[in-house]
């Protein structure tokens, strides 16, 4: 068997072992490691590379840990004449000096190589700009080929198989952009533009969060990440670039009127209407998003109504005031209009 | 150097005792009288390391319990998703305070406190060289710490995280006073830590048992030496950072505001340049304790003493090359990250050396499974795991995932609880017989250990997974259905197990701990080091001469001989408190240091210093300034009694060794302390210059910004000339003050006075010149940086002014002459430093922007 | 502290000081050049960032090697003339520290061969 084949066998064996060990560990801890927001369920090349680094270090670390613990117990409990060899300076030189130097001399270059290969800008990547704001995400898709630019919020949709180049910054304090299934995190720092690159390899719904403490509602600052097949992505993109759809029934028209007179447009933009505020999330296609409140609640007419009426109760400290004075009827109309903005 | 070289050879095996028996009548009584603790209300003016050390440890332990309770509330909140037990506002204060209190009010003070108590005993010194300074450090910490903690009851506690990242903590996003409490409260407690560090450095280097040369120094002393040097290098960075942020909050100087040329990352660099070494600052003293406990429990000398010293020193250095590994996700170039990755990897090697040294020691002896041993075993288990996850997060790509997730929470608690809390508990059990009439209960100790050990693992082991499956840190709640629920419940259960263990410990402490000095429980473990000698407030009756690292094992009658007064300095030479100062390498007796006794000055100075900072926080500026002035007054009152001069001719301490009771120059202990203080000051200044250069780097083409003029060459040249002139005058004054004839010419105060004028004039000219260019400190980071450098210089000039005036006052009071000139020496050293710093500041501020030409 | 003692202490931590110098140089140069976009510059056909790293590594490594050899010889010579415990101890620890520093300095030079200058 040549060296390469051996390596493949070893790699395969290691992989199976690690997967089984991980599965066992997950079972023991009564949770699934697969998840919409898990570094242990990689859905992209970078996340896989880091996942393998994790697995190798975990397995290696566990072995070293078991070794050290066994030596310690041996040093305490073995009969004195049998453990005498351990009680010498040699133990320190070999165990504490030579062994770490050899191990780390292998690990460090491996870590650096993973670092080199992770988060690498690619030709033809899809650019996306994300701006962290206190407790939500402003997302901009710049013009790309025939496609025009548009803004959305708290949701990132990406095509599978194409590299994504996300530029991030912040409008207020430091946030951190993290989609565990696709790779590491990158801080969003006012005055600096940082970049992170990743490729989604598996269609599905994932979740990202803010990883840097950013104030009162840091805990409620998440977003959805949806990986679509390229055609579906193009279709989504075309839809998003369009202006908001007209209300089709009187109730929704009333909702739009309430939106207008209530002054919602001074903070929110709904393209195709006079609402053009830039302070809060763009709501042109808010009805098409999976969740509201920055990844907090499933998006439906009920949660939308609840959000409008009780913002400060649900997520105290956000900029948007509660509109608790709306009548039930008005609230339904307004929420219905929002929900209709697919 | 006035100290004589010892005529005797050291390292003899056959002891012929320095002092004969029987000892003269009244000698012991005089010693006891000199060291008697004050009674009644004045008890709090005690400065002896035994008392101050214990108060210090007790206070630190109190903060451990308080911060632990905060953690329990947090764990209760996180037990269930979407829980409403505490709101977001309180939770954010809780986690900020938990981190801050554990780091600044528990961990660093606890290890410092333990060394105030243990170091002199272990080195058979009568006391630390500056007992009043330790008392001052303690009281400042006690008052400041309690008030700081009290803010949580009023909803005023800081809530921006223990790392206080701006802009979140800037005045725009945190307009309330919560952040100011952190900045002023912590900044000031750090000053107390630095005071302790200076004390420890001088204590380790200068006050040891005779013959305790560097190769016979207890490992604990080595650890504390490295610890103290690290504080001296690391803490100035965070002191400067807090100063800059407070200036930004108070006056709008934009160091961290991106729109005006600042950069939030500057804070992170400064904070972590302190923050990472901080971890090792906490860890090294704990390893020092372990290296003392393991040999005793295994009843065998430590294996690999030299390798452990290597590990301590290497850790001390390397830990300053790790700080960016807290910033792996900030978007720095991968190349830059790789250096920190390498250093973070490298620092694992010294830790490995220490772990294997302990294993080897255990294997070469026979480990008794006492409670201290159990805590040591627990420490090795937990710390090894934490160290291994530490190597994992040293790999930047892995850290990109793990950073700011619960994985890191797990890692840091494994390292800190394993690396510091467990050794500290081992130390509590181990050294209790020194401090108390009765040792703690071994039976309950097993319960304490069992609950804490299981508790730590149950709490933190699952968190590794919680983090990797996506749970970020510092969240007050989390959504249902993320797969985090079970793990969080388990962690909460574990936290309460730890609490139960600590509760049993407190119960046992209440039952068994009874303060003792000369009637302590004694050497119950058959330990080998000098803290187990029979002792009282004066520590040991006579200062032993040691010939090995394990004197109590190798010199069988040492305890009895020391107690009978057969060794050096069995009484008091001057009639007051005194310590024997030894040479830093070979520990030969150099001179007798007259140690100050109890006094109200350090207590009052500390209370008013605390009041100054705390009142400043709540913006009672005037009252605060009054308190500040009173504090300075108290310090001067305290200093006035020091520098006693040669009150008697050189004294015979036994064995034919005659040493003076007063020396000046580089052999003097306060000379050393002044050098260390200059290093502290130099580090603050270096960090400020780093900040200046950093801000230049982030402002291409705007350094200085458009429309900003740099002052003409004339002014900085004149300022530099005046600075140099003042240094020359001080050198001249020093020449006037030489000779054995105790002369004290009038030219000395005159030269000092003129030098003061020069120094202040130089500083004023520089300020005036900048002011004349209409440079605003709040318009752009450039102005802020320039004014920050100038402000620091002015602060040093003002301090020199006070010191110079004080020196003149000493002359007027006839307390300064050519022999009794320690006060002058200290002023002179500080003066040279101030002049040097001023010159560098002028070069940076005036030459750098011209050289770079605005690029 | 006499001059001889100061020298002894410096020799004891020479390797770590060399590491600190290497670290400061490579970090400062990388940050400054990358931060200002000057890293594309080349010198004698070598990219400036990796070249700085390699040369800083070589220089500090050689210096540490010298220190290590010197302290090792001091350490070995102890049999010829009687030395105090402190001296023998310092010489031995110096050898150990300088030896370990060699490895650490090398580790800091690796990245020049693996990573791009400023990405």
Image (cartoon, grey):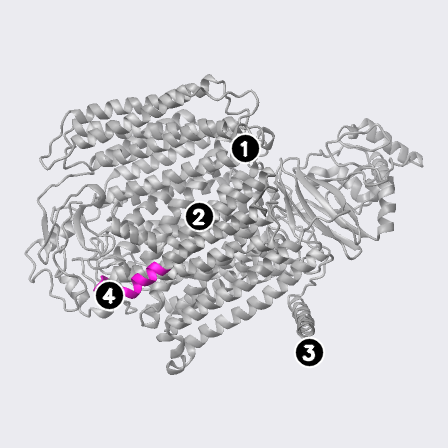
Between the residue at mark 3 and the residue at mark 4, the CA separation in whole angstroms equals 60 Å
Marker disc for residue B548 = 4
Q: Quadrant of the N terminus of chain A?
A: bottom right
Residue B284: % across, % down? 40, 56
Q: Residue at x 47, y 28 (%)?
A: B786
Number of residues whose C-alpha sits closer than 10 Å to that of mark 4, classed few (under 14), some (14–19) or many (20 or more): some
Write down the quadrant of residue B235 in the picture. Answer: top left
Instruction: Give yes or no for contact between labels 4 and 2 (Cβ–Cβ under 8 Å).
Output: no
Q: Which residue is mark 1?
A: B176
Q: Is residue C73 magenta?
A: yes
Front disc: 3 or 1: 3
Name the element at disc 2: helix
Q: Is residue C47 left or right of residue B785?
A: right
Residue B506: % across, % down? 41, 58
Instruction: Give yes or no for contact between labels 3 and 4 (Cβ–Cβ under 8 Å).
Output: no
Residue farthest to the top? B772
Between the residue at mark 2 and the residue at mark 3, the CA separation in whole angstroms equals 48 Å
Q: Which residue is mark 2?
A: C21
Marker disc for residue A1 = 3
Q: Is residue B2 left or right of residue B789?
A: left
Q: Is residue B214 magenta?
A: no
In the rendered view, would you say B193 is above or below B761? below
Q: Which chain contains the residue that carries disc 2?
A: C
Between the residue at mark 4 and the residue at mark 2, the CA separation in whole angstroms equals 37 Å
Residue at mark 1 shares a chain with residue at mark 4: yes
Q: Which chain contains the residue that carries disc 3?
A: A
Between the residue at mark 2 and the residue at mark 1, the CA separation in whole angstroms equals 42 Å
Number of residues whose C-alpha sits closer than 10 Å to that of mark 3, classed few (under 14), some (14–19) or many (20 or more): few
Q: Is residue A307 visible?
A: yes
């Amino acid at each position: 068997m040549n060296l390469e084949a051996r390596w493949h066998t070893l790699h395969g064996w290691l992989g199976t072992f690690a997967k089984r060990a991980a599965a066992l560990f997950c079972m023991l801890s009564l949770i699934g490691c697969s998840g919409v927001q898990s570094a242990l369920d990689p859905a992209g090349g970078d996340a896989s590379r880091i996942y393998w680094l994790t697995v190798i270090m975990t397995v290696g670390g566990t072995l070293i840990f078991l070794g050290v613990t066994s030596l310690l117990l041996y040093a305490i409990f073995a009969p004195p004449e049998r453990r005498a060899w351990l009680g010498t300076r040699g133990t320190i030189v070999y165990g504490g000096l030579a062994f770490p130097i050899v191990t780390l001399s292998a690990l460090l270059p491996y870590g650096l190589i993973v670092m080199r290969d992770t988060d690498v800008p690619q030709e033809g990547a899809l650019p996306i700009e994300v701006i962290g704001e206190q407790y939500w995400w402003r997302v901009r898709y710049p013009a790309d080929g025939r496609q025009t630019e548009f803004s959305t919020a708290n949701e990132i949709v990406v095509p599978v198989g194409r590299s994504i180049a996300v530029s991030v910054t912040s409008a207020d304090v430091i946030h951190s952009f993290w989609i565990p299934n696709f790779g590491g995190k990158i801080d969003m720092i006012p005055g600096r533009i940082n970049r992170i690159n990743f490729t989604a390899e598996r269609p599905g719904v994932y979740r990202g969060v803010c990883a840097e403490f950013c104030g009162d509602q840091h805990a409620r600052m998440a977003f959805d990440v949806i990986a679509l097949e390229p055609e579906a992505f193009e279709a989504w993109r075309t839809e998003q670039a369009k202006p908001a759809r007209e209300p089709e029934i009187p109730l929704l028209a009333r909702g739009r009127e309430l939106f207008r007179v209530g002054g919602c447009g001074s903070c929110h933009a709904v393209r195709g209407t006079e609402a053009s505020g830039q302070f809060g999330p763009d709501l042109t296609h808010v009805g098409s998003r999976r969740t509201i409140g920055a990844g907090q609640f499933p998006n439906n007419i009920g949660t939308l109504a609840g959000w409008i009426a009780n913002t400060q109760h649900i997520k105290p400290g956000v900029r948007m005031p509660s509109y608790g004075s709306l009548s039930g009827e008005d609230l339904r109309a307004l929420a219905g209009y929002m929900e209709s903005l697919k | 150097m006035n100290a004589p070289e010892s005529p005797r050879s050291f390292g003899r095996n056959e002891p012929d005792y320095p002092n004969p028996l029987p000892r003269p009548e009244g000698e012991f009584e005089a010693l006891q009288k000199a060291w008697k603790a004050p009674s009644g209300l004045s008890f709090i003016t005690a400065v002896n390391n035994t008392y101050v050390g214990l108060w210090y440890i007790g206070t630190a332990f109190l903060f451990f319990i308080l911060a632990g309770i905060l953690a329990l509330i947090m764990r209760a909140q996180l037990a269930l998703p979407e829980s409403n037990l505490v709101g977001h506002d309180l939770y954010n204060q809780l986690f900020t305070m938990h981190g801050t209190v554990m780091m600044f009010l528990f961990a660093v003070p606890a290890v410092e406190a333990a060394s105030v108590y243990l170091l002199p005993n272990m080195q058979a010194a009568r006391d630390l060289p500056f007992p009043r300074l330790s008392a001052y450090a303690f009281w400042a910490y006690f008052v400041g710490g309690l008030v700081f903690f009290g803010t949580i009851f009023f909803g005023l506690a800081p809530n921006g995280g223990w790392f206080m990242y701006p802009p979140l903590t800037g005045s725009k996003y945190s307009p309330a006073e919560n952040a100011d409490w952190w900045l002023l409260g912590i900044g000031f407690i750090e000053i107390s830590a630095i005071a302790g560090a200076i004390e420890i450095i001088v204590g380790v280097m200068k006050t040891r048992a005779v013959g305790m040369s560097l190769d016979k120094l207890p490992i604990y002393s080595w650890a504390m030496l490295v610890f103290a040097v690290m504080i001296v290098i690391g803490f100035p960075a965070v002191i400067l950072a807090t100063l800059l942020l407070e200036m930004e909050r108070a006056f709008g100087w934009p160091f961290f505001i991106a729109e005006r040329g600042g950069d939030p990352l500057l804070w992170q660099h400064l904070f972590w340049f302190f923050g990472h070494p901080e971890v090792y600052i906490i860890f090294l003293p704990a390893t020092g304790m372990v290296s003392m406990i393991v040999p005793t429990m295994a009843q065998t000398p430590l294996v690999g003493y030299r390798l452990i010293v290597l590990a301590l020193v290497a850790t001390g250095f390397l830990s300053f090359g790790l700080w960016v590994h807290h910033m792996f996700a900030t978007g720095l170039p991968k190349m830059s990250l790789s250096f920190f990755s390498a250093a973070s990897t490298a620092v694992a090697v010294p830790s490995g050396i220490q772990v294997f040294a302990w294993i080897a020691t255990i294997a070469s002896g026979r480990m008794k499974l006492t409670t201290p041993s159990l805590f040591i075993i627990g420490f090795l288990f937990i710390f090894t795991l934490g160290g291994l996850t530490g190597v994992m997060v040293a790999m930047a790509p892995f850290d990109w995932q793990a950073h700011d997730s619960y994985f890191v929470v797990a890692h840091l608690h494994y390292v800190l609880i394993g690396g510091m809390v467990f050794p500290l508990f081992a130390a509590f059990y181990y050294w209790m017989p020194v401090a108390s009439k009765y040792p703690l209960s071994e039976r309950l100790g097993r319960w304490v250990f069992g609950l804490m050990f299981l508790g730590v693992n149950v709490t933190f082991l699952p968190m590794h997974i919680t983090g990797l499956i996506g749970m970020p840190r510092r969240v007050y709640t989390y959504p249902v259905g993320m797969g985090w629920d079970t793990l969080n419940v388990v962690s909460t259960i574990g936290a309460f197990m730890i609490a139960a263990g600590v509760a049993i410990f407190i119960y046992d402490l209440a039952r068994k701990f009874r303060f003792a000095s000369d009637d302590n429980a004694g050497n119950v473990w058959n330990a080998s080091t000098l803290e187990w000698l029979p002792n009282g407030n004066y520590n040991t009756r006579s200062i032993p001469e040691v010939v090995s690292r394990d004197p109590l094992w190798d010199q069988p009658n040492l305890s009895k001989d020391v107690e009978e007064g057969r060794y050096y300095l069995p009484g008091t030479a001057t009639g007051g408190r005194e310590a024997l100062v030894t040479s830093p390498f070979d520990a030969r007796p150099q001179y007798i240091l007259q140690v100050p006794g109890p006094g109200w000055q350090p207590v009052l100075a500390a209370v008013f210093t605390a009041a100054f900072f705390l009142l400043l926080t709540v913006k009672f500026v005037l009252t605060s300034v009054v308190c500040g002035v009173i504090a300075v007054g108290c310090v001067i009152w305290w200093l006035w009694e020091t520098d006693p001069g040669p009150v008697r001719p050189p004294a015979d301490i036994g064995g034919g060794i005659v040493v003076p009771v007063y020396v000046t120059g580089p052999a003097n202990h306060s000379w050393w302390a002044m050098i260390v203080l200059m290093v502290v000051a130099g580090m603050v200044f270096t960090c400020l210059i780093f900040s200046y250069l950093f801000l230049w780097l982030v402002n291409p083409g705007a350094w200085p910004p458009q429309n900003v003029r740099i002052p003409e060459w004339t002014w900085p040249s004149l300022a530099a000339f005046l600075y140099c002139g003042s240094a020359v005058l001080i050198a001249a004054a020093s020449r006037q003050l030489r000779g054995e004839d105790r002369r004290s010419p009038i030219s000395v105060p005159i030269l000092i006075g003129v030098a003061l004028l020069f120094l202040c004039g130089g500083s004023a000219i520089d300020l005036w010149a900048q002011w004349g260019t209409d440079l605003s400190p709040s318009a752009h980071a450039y102005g802020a940086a320039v004014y920050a450098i100038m402000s620091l210089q002015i602060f040093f000039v003002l301090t020199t002014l006070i010191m110079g005036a004080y020196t003149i006052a000493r002359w007027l009071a006839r307390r300064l002459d050519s022999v009794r000139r320690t006060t002058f020496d200290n002023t002179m050293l500080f003066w040279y430093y101030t002049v040097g710093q001023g010159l560098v500041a002028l070069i940076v501020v005036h030459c750098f922007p011209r050289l770079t030409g605005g690029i | 502290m006499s001059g001889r003692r100061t020298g002894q202490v410096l020799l004891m931590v020479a390797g770590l000081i060399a590491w600190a110098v290497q670290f400061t140089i490579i970090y400062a140069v990388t940050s400054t050049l990358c931060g200002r976009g000057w890293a594309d510059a080349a010198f004698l056909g070598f990219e400036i960032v990796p070249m700085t790293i390699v040369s800083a590594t070589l220089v500090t490594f050689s210096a540490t090697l010298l220190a290590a050899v010197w302290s090792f010889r001091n350490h070995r010579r102890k049999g010829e003339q009687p030395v105090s415990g402190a001296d023998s101890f310092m010489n031995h620890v110096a050898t150990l520290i300088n030896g370990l520093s060699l490895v650490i300095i090398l580790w800091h030079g690796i990245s020049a061969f693996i990573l791009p200058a400023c990405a």
